[in-house]
Image (cartoon, helix red, strand yellow):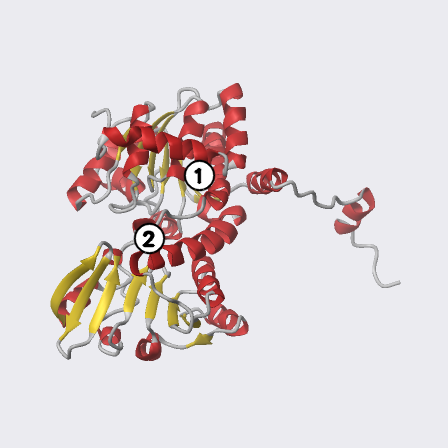
Amino acid sequence: MKASIVRDTNLAEGGKKRIEWISGRMPVLSLIRERYAHENPLEGVTVTACLHVTVETANLVLTLKAGGAEVALTAANPLSTQDDIAAALASLGIKTYAFRGEREDEYYECIDEALMIEPSVVLDDGGDAITRVHTVREELVKNIKGACEETTTGVIRHHARARENRLGFPVISVNDAETKMMFDNRYGTGQSTIHGIMNATNLLLAGRVVVVAGYGWCGRGVALRAKGLGSSVVVVETNPRKALEAVMDGYRVMPMREAAKIGELFITATGDISVIRGEHIELMQDGAILANTGHFNVEINLNDLEEKAVAKNEIKENVVEYRMRDGRKLYLLSEGRIVNLTAAYGHPPEVMDMSFANQALCVKYIVENYDKLRKEVYPVPKEIDEEVARLKLKSMGVEIEELTEEQRKYLVSWELGTQ
């Protein structure tokens, strides 16, 4: 097992400064770290974390270490690693296997190195590490007490495996915690996606037609931010309830075949495959920009884009121009990968504070309760979700109302009616 695989160890000092600075913007995780350092609840626990290697992730990993865990960290995307953070963590004794720009073989080599720790808990973002355990490193399954999944794409994969009775250990869907999806997915993805697009293009969004594919919590956030910057937002959605909600929120809703004709900027946020494909590419106007904020680079059909182009030119980092046979030029951002992490810094620390607080508390929950859990996908326990919310409010100096004894009794009774 290699000690670490990082781009440049000389970047470590700059990374440490960023970790310290961001730590002050993640107060909930800081409170949990202090508690873990005192209680040492993860003594003897080995954790493989396949997450985006960012400054926020660094604070999660250091929280687990403070609780006594031995952690090996690897990247959840070939382009999302912040090399200074990877170097900093390696210098702090965290086994780190990640660098920006990994080839596919290097990406899986790094995951395999992180699994050499023989984890008792796995933290995943997208499901690649958990899938690797089930398909290539099956001998590890028996040692794993449980796992946490950070994102929608991974949750879908784990539910599919569970339906086939092929899930080797319990998985907690951190993605579905209310303090994660309603804040991280909506406010984090919304802001960071627009940040990534503007970083890559310096695009003026005011007055521009922005097509958002998918109106889950991530799509809601992207649409909200684009609208706030003056864009005319079109939503593409397959779910009738979500489509109706988008209409009620003031957006135009239509199929992609119609949106393709009028869109100037396309942002996919569905977790599904080939949302934008050849038939849509044929309809797009000259200068259209394509971006994806879903976990995998499959939402924009890259094969169709390559086949329909007669020339390809890298304009700048994270922007590639495709010239069509009829002279139209389309622009793909970040190779179709998750634009908020490849062209920007990812989610702000204030929202990742809640997401990673859920992760840290769920690792402890797994260690203490794994023998009571079946090999299924579980929601985050309500008490953990609410504890994260309470801690976040406390850190913000917000006090909320409390129920009186009379009110508590009324809420669980049936006798009182119209008077």
Instruction: Name above or below for residue 329 compared with residue 360.
Output: below
Q: Determine which of the numbered discs, if any, sits on residue 295 in the image.
A: 2
Provide residue 258's location: percent of width, then percent of height: 34, 80
Left or right of residue 2: residue 21: right
Q: What residue type is labelled 2?
A: His
Q: Which amino acid does label 1 sit on?
A: Arg
In the figure, residue 310 lies in which quadrant? bottom left
Q: Distance between the residues labelled 1 and 2?
A: 27 Å
Task: Using a 10 Å C-alpha cutoff, classify the residue at mark 2 as few (fewer than 14 neighbours), some (14 to 19) or many (20 or more).
Answer: many
Work out which quarter of the rendered image holds the C terminus and state it: bottom right
Who is closer to the viewer here, 366 or 56?
56
Provide residue 26's location: percent of width, then percent of height: 50, 37
Q: Determine which of the numbered discs, if any, sits on residue 165 in the image.
A: none
Q: Determine which of the numbered discs, if any, sits on residue 374 in the image.
A: 1
Provide residue 322's location: percent of width, then percent of height: 17, 67
Q: Residue furthest left?
A: 310
